[in-house]
Amino acid sequence: AWRIGWRDVGAGIVIVLAGVMAFGRAEWRHRWKRPYQVALVVYVGFVAGDLIALKLIAGWTRGGIPWSTAPGLALLVLAAFVVPWTTRKPFYCHHICPHGAAQELIGQLRPTRFQVTLPASVIRGLDYLPAGLLVLTLLVVMLALPLDLAGLEPFAAYGVRAAGWATLSVAVAGLVASFFVPQAYCRFGCPTGA
């Protein structure tokens, strides 16, 4: 039997709102972008905690997708994969991820003098990091290595009481870096986005 709770309803609402933000009229999207991003950080991040992460997907590959116990989260993951493939528009990363929204909000606080332009050689080197972390994740999952994948990403940090030091460190470092380099973690560190 399907168990639909408040988090599942909330995930459905978030998917609909993300669709409006991705495909709606430009003037409406620009007017509501900041309040929407604050709502993402608060609701998706801290209240519901339904974030797509490598640890989640790895767990589902081992135990199956929990359609009946977490239909909202399963629908969110499905939308995150299907919408970009069918529309060529970024969906989860740009319109649902609370960590991406937090980075963008932090970037709005940055005075221009604090923005750092990285040298092209550094950017080329950092461009390999998300793919490298994704390969590491595949190896961990396929070889059943004893590595907690939550420590590679900041997403578990939104469940502050349950987050480990590695996760909190990645989250804080990503947010601090985004003050100087726009969307630093999304661009140079996110294996889930890759």
Image (spheres, rainbow, N blue to C red):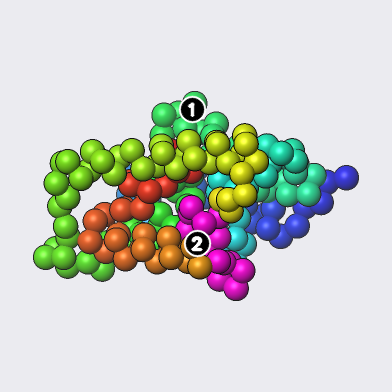
Residue 155 belongs to the span the image colors magenta: yes
Q: Residue at x 75, y 41 (%)?
A: 63
Q: Residue at x 68, y 48 (%)?
A: 72
Earlier sequence position, callout 1 versus callout 2:
1
Nearer to us in this view, 26 or 111? 111
Q: Position of residue 154 (x, y in %)?
A: 47, 58
Q: Position of residue 164 (x, y in %)?
A: 55, 66
Instruction: Quickly name the residue at label 1.
Output: 85
Instruction: Quickly name the residue at label 2.
Output: 167
Mark 1 nearby-residue class (10 Å; few <14, some 14–19, many ≥20):
few
When asked about the image quadrant of residue 10, the answer is bottom right
Give me the disc on residue 146. Answer: none
Q: Residue furthest top?
A: 86
Kind of residue sitting beneath label 2: Thr
Q: Is residue 93 above or below residue 154?
A: above
Q: Residue at x 14, y 46 (%)?
A: 119
Helix, strand or loop under label 1 = helix
Determine whether, in the image, residue 143 is placed left or right of residue 66: left
Residue 42 belongs to the span the image colors magenta: no
**Real-space Cα distance between discs 1 and 2?**
29 Å
Mark 2 nearby-residue class (10 Å; few <14, some 14–19, many ≥20):
many
Helix, strand or loop under label 2 = helix
Q: Residue at x 52, y 64 (%)?
A: 157
Q: Is residue 74 above or below residue 184?
A: above
Determine whether, in the image, residue 102 is placed left or right of residue 137: left
Q: Residue furthest right?
A: 1
Which image quadrant: the N terminus? Answer: top right
Region in magenta = 150-164
Determine whether, in the image, residue 154 is placed left or right of residue 25: right
Q: Position of residue 56 (x, y in %)?
A: 62, 47
Kind of residue sitting beneath label 1: Trp
